[in-house]
Image (cartoon, helix red, strand yellow):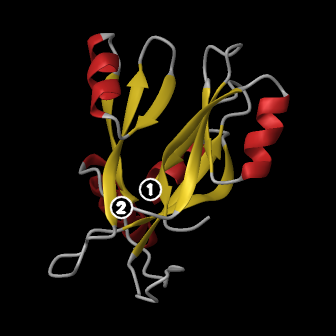
């Protein structure tokens, strides 16, 4: 009986990954209009062997990566969840995750031109996508010119941003907005 329950849970979570969705967590976001917003959590997972960070809204994917030796670093940022029949005007452009099968690297962007150009160069569009906030906390994008894998890093922390810049990373600006950090 226990094996059936675990297998069923894994199948349900696996279906959510394949469909590019997540299991939403309803919490109240900090908002100037004091509205309750259904919030999606994007977690950060770190591979100590390659130096890559993966950002995911999939509980199943995060759990699988941790089982493979990655370290969960907790919540990276929070994004609005689409709700049928509700006002979704707080959403900005959707972030697409791309994967480079040659380098084993992931890249996150809401810029349609970047997506198109990377796909032309052999990157694959991944199944993980998530909305951004129209306004909110900036998510900074940094680039490590010395890395072949894990070359991009995303954070809402100005401390992390400044620390990485002091260690040779290049600040590329605000990638998108989070509801809160």
Tell me which corner region of the image, top left, top right, bottom left or bottom right, holds residue 146: top right
Q: Nearer the viewer, residue 59 or 93?
A: 93
Q: Position of residue 148 (x, y in %)?
A: 62, 13
Q: Pointer 2: residues within 10 angstroms few (<14), some, or many (20+)?
A: many
Residue 44 lies left or right of residue 8; in this view the side is right
Q: Nearer the viewer, residue 20 or 86?
A: 86
Q: Which is nearer the N-term, disc 2 or disc 1?
A: 2
What residue is rendered at 30% in x and 57% in y? 21
Q: Nearer the viewer, residue 91 or 128?
A: 91
Quadrant assignment for the N terminus: bottom left
Q: How many marks?
A: 2
Residue 153 lies left or right of residue 82; in this view the side is right
Q: Pointer 1: residues within 10 angstroms few (<14), some, or many (20+)?
A: many
What residue is rendered at 27% in x and 33% in y? 112
Q: Position of residue 3 (x, y in %)?
A: 43, 65
Label 2 with label 1: CB-CB less than 8 Å: yes
Q: Secondary structure at mark 1?
A: loop
Q: CA distance from mark 2 to mark 1?
A: 6 Å
Quadrant assignment for the C terminus: bottom right
Tell me which corner region of the image, top left, top right, bottom left or bottom right, holds residue 173: top right
Q: Residue furthest left?
A: 85
Q: Secondary structure at mark 2?
A: loop
Above or below residue 9? Residue 18 is above
Mark 1 — residue?
A: 57
What residue is rendered at 49% in x and 85% in y? 28
Above or below residue 26? Residue 105 is above
Q: Position of residue 142 (x, y in %)?
A: 63, 32
| Mark linked to residue 22 | 2
Q: Position of residue 29 (x, y in %)?
A: 50, 79
What residue is rendered at 84% in x and 27% in y? 167
Tell me which corner region of the image, top left, top right, bottom left or bottom right, holds residue 80: bottom left
| Mark linked to residue 75 | none
């Amino acid at each position: 009986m226990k094996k059936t329950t675990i297998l069923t849970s894994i199948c349900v979570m696996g279906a959510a990954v394949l469909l590019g969705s997540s299991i939403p967590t309803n919490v109240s976001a900090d908002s100037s209009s004091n509205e309750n917003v259904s919030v999606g959590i994007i977690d950060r997972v770190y591979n100590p062997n390659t130096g890559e960070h993966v950002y995911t809204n999939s509980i199943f994917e995060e759990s699988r990566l941790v089982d493979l030796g990655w370290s969960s670093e907790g919540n990276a940022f929070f994004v609005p969840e689409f709700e049928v029949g509700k006002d979704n005007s707080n959403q900005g452009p959707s972030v697409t995750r791309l994967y480079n099968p040659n380098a084993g690297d992931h890249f996150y962007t809401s810029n349609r031109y970047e997506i198109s150009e990377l796909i032309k160069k052999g990157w694959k569009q991944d199944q993980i996508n998530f909305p951004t906030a129209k306004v909110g906390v900036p998510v900074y994008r940094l680039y490590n010119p010395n890395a072949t894998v894990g070359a991009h890093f995303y954070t809402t922390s100005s401390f992390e941003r400044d620390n990485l810049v002091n260690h040779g990373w290049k600040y590329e600006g605000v990638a998108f907005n989070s509801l809160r950090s």
